[in-house]
Every structure is written in structure tokens, then in C-alpha cells.
Amino acid sequence: MAQRYKLFIGGEFRDSTTGEIFDDINPATLENLATIQIAGSKDVDRAVEAAEAGFKVWSKIPAPKRAEVLFRAARILQERKEELAVLMTEEMGKVLPETRGDVQEAIDITNYAAGEGRQMLGETTTSELKEKFCMTILRPIGVVGLITPWNFPIAIPAWKIMPALITGNAIVFKPASDTPLLAHKLVEVLIEAGLSPGVINLVTGPGGTVGKAIVQHPRINAISFTGSLDTGKWIMEECSKTMKRVSLELGGKNPVIVMDDADLELALEGVLWGAFGTAGQRCTATSRLILHEKIKDEFIKRLLAKTKALSVGNGILPETDIGPVINKAQLEKIERYVRIGKEEGATLLFGGNRIDPGLPGYFFEPTIFTDVKPKMRIAQEEIFGPVLGILTVSNLEEAIEVANNTKYGLSSAIYTGNIGNAFRAIEKIEAGITYVNAPTIGAEVHLPFGGVKGTGNGFREAGTEAVKEFSEIKAVYIDYSGRLQKAQIDSAE
Ligand code: UN1
């Protein structure tokens, strides 16, 4: 029988008040990996209370000491890397080298955030008045609600949890219902690393109830969410009612431009990896390929040959290039978009169907559309599957215009041998990330991650921005003149 997992509140594993459960399914084999409890709003209340208590203790611990817990957590993650990667492939389907990468990304951000324990820099600056000292300091926000997606079951939670912890906050964490097991494992690691009770609380269950209770909770001070644009809009609206800080990482419709002066073999490898890695289920996945007309035919010919050679199957097997997609709804959504693409008049060059590698799970062929026009829905809407649309352009200016013709702006890439083209693209592509001669996926944790337009609300995660996402900034004025000095009124001659 599948193991039953409880909620984790106030340092204890607890049964939910609803008594309801859901199954955690392997998307390749449809085997039930675990039974997970569904939290109710009472459980969210308890989690917030526990977090408030945890916050009182944790926020008073000096940041370099908090960092020791994180460094220990990074070491434990490192020791358990293989076990966690295998479990992740079973839980969400992506191939083993990628799940190892996911755990590695969690280790990296954990170490990075721990290092911040001895930084967390504020500023000191001048004053317009004599004998007055001015500086800024960072303060924790309080109780933060973290709501995470299934495509990076440990890396994205770690992107949020570790910076939130190092800055002294306490957490109510709701992972995606497709990947609750890896969330449990991450919490386990933090407990083993010595995190005080109540500092992290795990509540599992649907976004529509548990996520909603977190977002609407009057005593949660901030929300950090990664997921869809529609949910992000709703969260932002809700957060305005309680004046919560909210940081959003939403979708992408990420373009790769391949110019006529590019190294085509390099670009091919990058496009394949960006479009079909993780079965296209990354916010950063390459979903639009913008080809210069001069190399178009040759590039498509080579891309087709390489795509045909990709093997779809169980991500646990070394010969597999593409694992299953996450669930039935996602599979059906991808099928729907293939139908839409055909109806809109794009040409289906390859794929477009479910595939049966001898397992009952949710497998879909790598799929390529050519003759895609910028206005088509398959060029505008996020599909989140192994579907690539090819558009053709006659120069860089047009390529950039096409690249920017979407409501999203997360990742982007250009392949070119011309430094001028590269810099023009860096300057003009509307995105939070631009790669030159590299694919749209593969962001590193010490750089800010996030996007413009519909991709977010101006926040960035990870990197130098991670601390800011989870801190309040306070301006401090220390007047040691011993007299009342009036800014803007007394002159400081
Ligand atoms: C995501 O899909 O939301 O850059 C995150 C990348 C990974 C993170 C992706 N490091 O593709």
C-alpha cells in the first residue's frame, strides 16, 4: 500500500481536519506513489499560528547562524541527491539527468542563500544635515505563503524557501498536488538540518481551496507564487484586499532566433534541448523558433532528422530523451493545441499525437509546426508541452518584432556569429533573460530569474534579488547633533 503522508505543522506531522486524501501518481506508470492529505482552512489557520510562533524564534537568530541550518540542508541534499532524483522522476516524469539537475539547483540556491547570511547588505549614505547618519537595513516580512509548481518539484520550492529562511521569515508552504512527495522530502531535509519548529509548515491540497486559504489569509504577509498567468492575476487581485506583498513568476512563450550567420549545429542542439527537454514543461521552454529565411530549409531538415531520433518513454531509463507529461489534463491540453494549430493553418511537420511506449502513462510525441504566423494562438499561448512552432523572418529587426509579439517575456535566445546582432537582441528583446548562443533554459541560481509583461509583476527570484523578494527595507536616520535639525528646512552650511 502507498505510504500515507500527513501535513507538517508546528514541527509535527499532523492529520488534516478534512479527513480527505488524494493520490500521488507516477505519470509514466500510473502507479500510486503515496497518499497525501488534503488540508482544510482550519489547517491553514493552524499553520499560520505555528508560523507566527516559529517567526518569533527564527527572526531573532542572527543570519549567519540561520545560515548554518541552510549549509547543513545543502549537505543533506547533496548526500541524498540520487535518491531524491529517482523519486522525482517517478513523481513527475522528467528524465533522470534532469531530475538530478533539479536537485542540484536546490543545492545551489541553498548554498547561495546560506552565503547571504553573511551579506544581506544595506546601504550607508550621506545626509543633507550635519552630524546625521543614514543607512538602510533589511527586516524579515513575517509569515510568507509559498505556492509552487510541479515542473521543478524541489528547485523552485528551494528558490523560495531558502531565501525566505535566510532573511528570517517563517513559511506556510503549499506545493503542487502533482508533486507533494518531493515537497515532503525537502521539508524532511530542513528538519534534519535543525530548523526550529514552526518555521516551515507544509499544507497539501488543491490550489482552489488550500492555495486560496493561504492567499486570503489576513495574517500571511506575503505570497510568492510560480504558476499560470490566470492564477497569478487572481492572486494579485486577492492580495490587494489584504495589502500583501506578492511576487509572481508566470508563464513564458520563449523565442529562439536563429540568424543566417549562426553556427547551425550549435543552434540545433540548443533548440532541441530548449523545446523538448522536460517535455517542454518549463516556463523557460523554447516554444517559438524564429528562423532567418536564408537558413530556414536547411535548419528544418536537420531539426526534423534529430527530432525523429528522440526517444519518448519512462524517464528512469537511460535511453529515454523525453519522459511523460505530468497528467491527463495536461496531455489533453497539448492535444487541444495541436488541433488549434492545424485549424489555424499551421503545417504539422512532425508529431502531434499521444504515443505508447508500452506504459499506460501520459506520453506525447515531440511536435513541430511550421508556417506559424505571429498572431496564431499556438504562437501566443503557453502550451507547456513538447510543441515547437516555427516562424520565418527576413532580418533581425523582424525577428525581434516577432519575438516581442507576445504577452509574456521570460526567456529568449539568439544564435548568431555577429556581435552586433547579439547586442541588438540583448537590448531589444522584451524578456527577463536573454541567452546568446545558448538555449532558453538553464538559468543559474546566482542571477536574477523572472520576466517582464505577463510573466510577472516586476519581482525577480534567486540571485541578488532573492534577499529583496523576502525582506522589508527600512531607512534609518541617526541624528547625533543633539539638536532638532529639520530636513528640507535647515540648511547645512
Ligand atoms: C521554470 O520552468 O519555472 O532556467 C524554472 C531553467 C531552470 C529553471 C526553470 N533553471 O530552465
Image (cartoon, grey):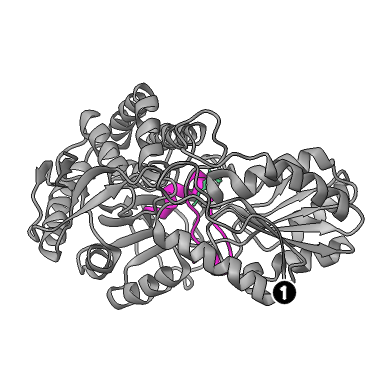
Image location (x, y in percent) of residue 89:
41, 37
Residue bounds of the magenta highlight = 448-470
Q: Quadrant of residue 305?
A: top right
Residue 157 left/right relative to 386: left
Q: Is mark 1 within 8 Å of ligand 1?
A: no
Say if 229 sits above or below 301 in the image: below
Q: Residue sitting at 35 percent across and 24 percent down? A: 75
Disc 1: which residue:
345
> Which quadrant does the C terminus fall into?
bottom right
Q: Amino acid at mark 1?
A: Gly
Q: Is residue 403 visible?
A: yes
SS state under label 1: loop
Image location (x, y in percent) of residue 294:
92, 55
Image location (x, y in percent) of residue 302:
80, 44
Residue 213 among those drawn in magenta = no
Nearest to the observer: residue 425 or residue 241:
425
Q: Is residue 134 visible?
A: no
Q: Residue sitting at 42 percent across and 54 percent down? A: 469
Residue 457 among those drawn in magenta = yes
Crowding near the residue tagged with mark 1, few <14, some 14–19, many ≥20 C-alpha atoms within 10 Å:
some
Image location (x, y in percent) of residue 97:
51, 31
Q: Quadrant of residue 214?
A: bottom left
Nearest to the observer: residue 482 or residue 426:
426
Residue 231 left/right relative to 8: right
> Which quadrant does the N terminus fall into?
top left
Residue 195 left/right relative to 489: left
Say if 64 sits above or below 380 in the image: above
Q: Quadrant of residue 200?
A: top left
Nearest to the observer: residue 295 or residue 485:
295
Residue 206 left/right relative to 115: left
